[in-house]
Image (cartoon, grey):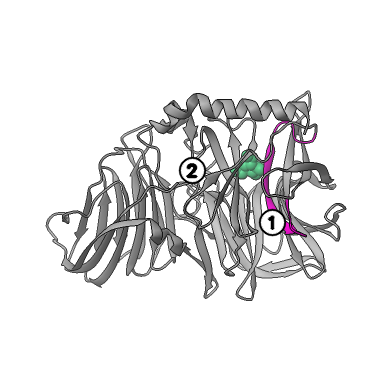
Amino acid sequence: MNQRDVLRKEKAYKAIEKYEDVVSNDPFRMHYHIMPPVGLLNDPNGFIYYKGTYHLFYQWNPFGTEHTTKFWGHVTSQDLVNWQAQPIALAPSDWFDKDGCYSGSAIEVDGKLVIFYTGNVRDENGNRETYQCMAVSTDGVYFEKKGPIATLPAGYTPHFRDPKVWKYQDHWYMIVGAQTVNKEGTVVLFSSTDLEKWAFLGGIAGANLNGLGKFGYMWECPDLFYLDGKEVLLVSPQGLDPNGDEFNNIYQSGYFVGALDVKQPSYTHGRFHELDRGFDFYAPQTSEDSKGRRLLVGWMGIPEENEADHPTISHNWIHAMTLPRELELVKGKLYQLPVEELKTLRGKEVYYADVLLNTTEPLELDQVNGTVIELLIDVVDNESDIFCIEIGEKSKIVFDASKERLTFQRQQFKQSKQEERRCHLKNINKIQLFRDVSSIEIFVNEGEAVFSSRIFDNPTDGSIRFFASAETKINVHKWSIKRAT
Ligand code: FRU
């Protein structure tokens, strides 16, 4: 570790200490989500189950709530629910990462935890340089940087980052998010036998590749994994135009289902699906655990999207992770459900069976309320066109049967106007909803659709109201949720 590394980490720890009270006194602070201790959190990085413990790293600016310098923060867990802060994993302190230890991934090799990340460097004229770097730990806590292991191939701009590494047969493979010199977003593949020398194999998916046509100017944070006989590619493309109910956030996050041939290399795939239909979701990363589950964590935020309007900035922090989800492939589509360990956070339960909804005015159920809660609603009998759940002052879920559309509405952060996101859905039979003060995550029909959003209207209004336009019967479970550590 160089002297600069020691100093930068010390300065970051001091920032945590200095703002601890201001941060924890924020009425919008959450109870069971991963948040930065101070400053800005963005992408999940290096997600791995290593030696009996879940490790999650995150993009972190300890010194402010903007995207300037980036460290790797680190938390660990035994159960994906309670997370312990660990010492800072990476600080931007070397010539190859001096302006940011950008996103990347982790693998286990011979008992060591090895991480790959992008070193972001700006030269004296502000031009971007990119280095794919490696760092190694023998205890999962302290990392030794090994420096760059792959350079920028011809044909791509320095927007080339976010390595994800995996092993297949006797080779290591690495995909990287990239931009071609023609300003097309793409994902490229490298291979290696020793993790130190990497051969560039070429592009495997991207705009104007595999019949995709125009599809954004940059693809960030790729992830590729095997699930149920298919290879699923996650990417976060930038530069897609809104298309009806799709692509309404500034940047998207989604997936292709396909087949990868590493020899060619080639990836044949179907259409792009958005992963999450809410306002705040980006740059997810997955990992397989010892139970064989494919787990996903996303950033519950999006770069440049309303960031300056988050009220938490006045308390010196911004953003959080989503709850961890388990992925399944159902008829060619990814289904996402909150991990079952979250049930351990359930406190007191309230249950109502066969509630017949009024059609004249919204119905409130005694004790079905709260700002830190889980709700599970079975729609047992739905005769209505419109079925609606209002949460707090300004958030609303509306299912419109005649339009086959689910809508989530919230209040804009800085104005009193409402805004909404929508998705196509044939019917609705189950809604699982997690509210954590300033966030709402909605899992519909056992994971068929997910909406994740932050809400910043009234952090103390936990009221919930149900409404239907014609006779509708629901069962309602409500749990208060305990504070996670
Ligand atoms: C995605 C991203 C990555 C980059 C990181 C920097 O949100 O822009 O492409 O590595 O954030 O923090």
Q: Amino acid at mark 2?
A: Ala
Q: Which residues are magenta?
A: 96-114
Side of 10 relative to 331 (left or right): right
- The residue beneath circle 1 is 206
**Tag 2's secondary structure?**
loop
What secondary structure predominates along the stretch shown in magenta?
strand
Q: Residue at x 59, y 42 (%)?
A: 86
Residue 99 in the magenta stretch? The answer is yes
Residue 20 placement, left or right of 286: left
The front one of 24 and 485 is: 485
State yes or no: Cβ of the residue under disc 2 lies below 8 Å from any atom of ligand 1.
no
Q: Nearer the viewer, mark 2 or mark 1?
A: 2
Which picture quadrant has residue 378? Answer: bottom left
**Nearer-the-camera pick, 444 or 436:** 436
Task: Please name the residue that numbered disc 2 is placed on.
Answer: 320
Q: Position of residue 147 (x, y in %)?
A: 81, 41
Q: Nearer the viewer, residue 174 or 245?
A: 174
In what quadrant of the picture does the N terminus appear? top right
